[in-house]
Image (tube, coloured by chain):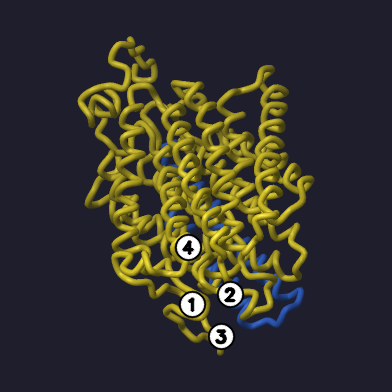
Chain colours: A yellow, B blue
Amino acid sequence: MIAPASLPFTETEFALTLALLLVAPLAPAGVALLNTGLGRSRSAAQSLLGSLLLVAAASLVFAVVGATVADGVAGSGHIAIINGKPWNWAGTGSWLLQGLGTAPARGQAAVLFYFVALALAVLIPWGSGADRWRLTAGAASAVLIGALFFPFFAHWTWGGGWLSRLGVNFSLGAGFLDVGGAATVQVLGGLCALAVIWITGSRRGKFPKEGFSTAMPGHNAVYILFGCLVALVGWLAFNMAGALLWLGAAPSALPLTAVNTLLSASGAIAASFTLTRIRFGKPDASLCANGWLAGLVTSSACASLVSPMGAIFTGLVAGIGVPLLVEFLELGVSLDDPSGAISVHAGAGLWGLIAAGLFAPQPGQFVAQLMGIATLLGLMLPLIYFVFMLLNRFVPFRVDADGERIGMDLHELGGGAYPEFVVHRDDSYR
Amino acid sequence: MKFAGLLVMPAGFLLSIAAILLFPPSLSRVAFVACGVAVEAMGLAVSIRGHMMGERR
């Protein structure tokens, strides 16, 4: 991986990156729609308002604190010398984004990329805590993601940090490759989702003491499926911007990235459609949507690095694996994940990172990818869980039983998303 | 049980770090890094199982 300002950035490339990054926020918009559709109707307004609030909170704190840690150029940063090798563990950016307007063009575009990536990362756990995670606790978690977890990992992968320098320091291919944010955004967000589910627990009535888990389907399939289409547009732009910024790809290489993104998602939804049709007799809309998104998540790691056939293969594997993982996590290990974020974002993201290592031509690339995965699972997940657990003592994550019964909209906002609709009684509270 | 799993996971990370620090590029380095990830996966499995037992109680 390269770091901002370490390669020249022409005016054309800058303009193209800027244009792509102005379209890329459609990715978090699509995920917000998906999250809302996959939750219940009585929590829909809270879900979308929460999406805005979380993005705002994370962006503000990133501008104040996070950008300082995330920013960096190759060779600069807080460096520890271990065993004679430099370990760049934190950036040395200016506070409050001072000097952004006069920074090199690549550095300015990188900061914009960070903001879009962070917006996507904070929305991933928000969907997993649907129908029980309080708005203030969600915003507080977004503050921690924007100030702590995301900036450090973004620096390690994109800002010239130690993961990106594994190739130079330890002969591990080109260092840890995360062109479209599969690790820094998707897996990190998925691990935050896992921590949130561990802390909040499941929705009331989801796992009765006897019998199978209660089905709590999403309330609006149109939101879910339209969210997938919106996310595609954002993902195309985001992956191409990542290739320009972090791989130093020429604009002429971008059509391949875009085609691979589309092929990965297409392969994934085709596999999910076929699998759910075989298993249930009819295709399942929400699992197909999860499959589509899993294909996009996989493309975040691979789209710029593999051939079109490779993109279809990675998408197919994601499309088969994610619906099975969704089912296993719910029925096998009692994890109540309304949006399927752990399977879609963490599961497919990890698969994409492994696939990027398998398909890469450089020797040692697979080990570099494993090192990134080891850092996410062995360092970031325990850190996220213990910090969130501490936060939960001061800002309780879970709404009280009465709030959960009447719905998050009425409890937290005083009004529902669909005031003219009749809301059906929920049998699971009998 | 969940905490035990979460405490095992950093051990896997340190094993991976030690592998790239101590071994030259070789098959043994790949094996040790893979073992580190496997230790993390075991820790994750223990944590998930701990959560599952809590939910079903």
Q: Nearer the viewer, mark 4 or mark 3?
A: 4
Residue at the limit of the structure toward the front, as seen here: A11
Q: Earlier along the polypeptide chain: callout 4 or callout 1?
A: 1
Query: Dot 1, how many residues are within 10 Å of its Cα: few (below 14), some (14-19), or many (20+)?
Result: many
Rounded to the nearest angstrom, the CA distance separating label 4 from label 3 is 21 Å
Rounded to the nearest angstrom, the CA distance separating label 3 from label 2 is 10 Å
Q: What residue did someone put label 2 on?
A: A165
Instruction: Look at 43% across and 27% down and name the residue there.
Output: A208
Which chain's residue wears label 4?
A
Q: Quadrant of residue B13?
A: bottom right
Which chain's residue wears label 3?
A
Q: Amino acid at mark 4?
A: Ala
- The percent position of residue A129, horizontal first and vertical second, equals 39, 38
Q: What residue did someone put label 1 on?
A: A88
Q: What residue did someone put label 4 on?
A: A154
Q: What residue did someone put label 3 on?
A: A85
- The percent position of residue A356, horizontal first and vertical second, equals 69, 57
